[in-house]
Image: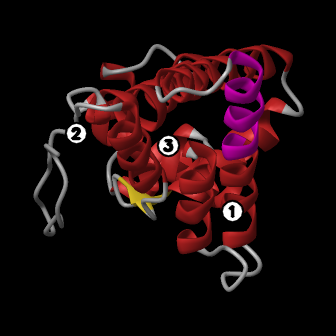
Amino acid sequence: MAGTGPQTKGETRDLTREDWLIAAVAALADGGVEAVRVERLAKSLGVSKGSFYWHFKDRPQLLAAILDLWDVDFTQQLIDNAAGLATPQLRLRHLARDALARTVYGIDSARAEAAIQSWAATDLQVAERLRAVDTARLAYLERELAAAGQQPDKARARAKVLYLALLGLYAARGYNPELADDGAYLALVELALQ
């Protein structure tokens, strides 16, 4: 990622839009949407607020970009990573392993997901976006399960079970790491494929 690295006294660095965006997602994961403040981000990045305005018009534009990044990198990229595999079973296993990744861009993926959900609980537009992403994620799982031979009703139910179990695993990572057992989730994927 461009622009990252320690800054020495008297040295300036040109931050990219991605640098600001990753810092914003990290702030969201750590402190919720209220932690995503331009001045706070600038301080954490060791730059002035002026740098921010080269890349974003304002905070609402940054918040919209967070949702775009989450949709693409925390959803579509996982699907794309598995797309070239030969069978739905291989694709779903690969997707499950990718979804269990502890970090994306150095950010705790489970905390980022939880922060998006908390934000959606207080913002109708974010809730609408979250529902659209949930729908897309479930549709993908359902299609792959159907391609693996599941009847449509079973594919739909198993897609929901897999998705809800993953969200539960993410939630448990925050308070009970022993319960958040990646191996148990992978075993559930295998059961869903039977």
Q: Residue at x 15, y 68 (%)?
A: 9
Mark 2 closeness class: few <14, some 14–19, many ≥20 residues within 10 Å: some
Q: Residue at x 56, y 21 (%)?
A: 146
SS label for mark 2: loop
Q: Amino acid at mark 2?
A: Leu
Marked residue nearer the N-terminal end (1 or 2): 2
State whether residue 59 appears in this view.
no
Q: Residue at x 53, y 62 (%)?
A: 186
Q: Does the CB distance between marks 1 and 2 fall below 8 Å?
A: no
Question: Was residue 11 drawn as part of the magenta stretch in this picture?
Answer: no
Marked residue nearer the N-terminal end (3 or 1): 3
Does 190 appear above or below 162? below
- Relative to residue 159, is residue 18 drawn left or right? left
Cα distance between the residues tagged 1 and 2: 34 Å
Check disc 3 and report the residue beneath it. Answer: 24
Does 72 appear above or below 15? above
Can you tell which mark lies on residue 15? 2
Q: Quadrant of residue 18?
A: top left
Cα distance between the residues tagged 3 and 1: 24 Å
Front one among 166 and 9: 166
Residue range corresponding to the magenta coloring? 152-163
Question: Was residue 156 drawn as part of the magenta stretch in this picture?
Answer: yes
Mark 3 closeness class: few <14, some 14–19, many ≥20 residues within 10 Å: many
Our reading of the magenta stretch's main secondary structure is: helix
* Residue 175 image offset from top left, x and y in percent: 77, 77
* Residue 192 image offset from top left, x and y in percent: 62, 46
Q: Nearer the viewer, mark 3 or mark 2?
A: 3
Can you tell which mark lies on residue 169? 1
SS label for mark 1: helix
